[in-house]
Amino acid sequence: MKAAAVALNTIREALRERLMYNLAVFALVLIGGSLTISQLTLGEQYRIIADIGTSSSQLFGTFIAVFLGVAMMAREVDRRTCYAALARPISRAQFLVGKYLGLAAVLALNVAAMAAATAAMLLVYRGPGGIPAGPFLGAFSLIFVHLCLCAAFAFLFASFSTPTLSVIFTLSVIGAGHVFSEVRPFWLTTPNVGLKSLVRVLDFTLPNMGLVDMKEALTYGDAVTAGSFALRLGYGLTWTGLALVGAAVIFSRKDVR
């Protein structure tokens, strides 16, 4: 209940942020423009609309998750607004989890809006029944998990670093995770033993962001199995939980006086 109260206050706070609306509107305009862009090609309209819709949702959602997550934690400490809450019978871990749940709820609203915009564009092009339900739900569900993971890392770095460095660290980890997902198959097939050893280390120290992604399933109409979705969902939630636990431990030990 204590974390829920903090979460509700966080939702109200986040909904007043202009940055979130600016990024969300830009993403929605880009998704809407995908229908026009798709007319420049022949026979690939559906793939272009789906690709732009999912990619812009993930990209701008990532910016919202990172910048809002860092700003929320930094603002609480810099303005000392967290003192009033921490003076009450609420632990720092509960306070942090409440802030995170509030941000996750806002991210869910953003993903829902972007998913609705993408669905509308696909319906305009293909008509009713033209959207594969499984790939569509799988793609946007994992986009939400991806954003939750980004927000968790934002909270982790913001719990001990400055806002600017926290944004840089978070975007660096997320970017490295995407690059790692692309180069990992090639490193595993190389005869270089050192690269194979590096892959084993990175498997446990860096999130493979390619595993929290099903955009291509919607773009190319691939079938989505329950097992594959569950594994990807579990992987993303596991990394999210680890980042949150780390943030809670660091914030609990931080001197905010």
Image (tube, grey):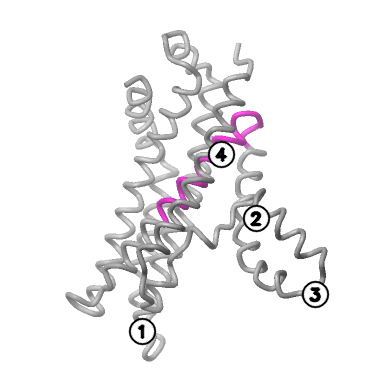
Q: Quadrant of residue 246?
A: top right
Q: Nearer the viewer, mark 1 or mark 4?
A: 4
Question: Does label 1 or label 4 sit earlier along the sequence?
Answer: 1
Q: CA distance from mark 3 to mark 4?
A: 34 Å
Measured along the vertical axis of the image, is residue 166 above or below residue 224?
above
Residue 156 among magenta residues: yes
> In the image, which disc is placed on residue 243?
4
Question: Which element type, helix, strand or loop, lies under badge 4?
Answer: helix
Quick one: label 3, few (<14), some, or many (20+) residues within 10 Å? few
Disc 2 crowd, CA 10 A, few/some/many (<14, 14-19, 20+)? some
Identify the amino acid type marked 4: Ala
Seen as rendered, the residue at the extreme front is: 227
Drawn side of residue 17 relative to residue 1, left or right? right
> Which residue was labeled with disc 3?
191
Q: Earlier in the sequence, mark 3 or mark 1?
A: 1
Span of residues in magenta: 143-163
Q: Eyeballing the image, is 36 above or below 104?
A: below
The residue tagged with tag 3: helix, strand or loop?
A: loop
Amino acid type at circle 1 is: Gln
Residue 225 is inside the magenta segment: no
Label 4: how many residues lie within 10 Å, few (<14), some (14-19) or many (20+)? many
Reading the image, the residue beneath label 2 is 203
Lower sequence index among marks 3 and 2? 3
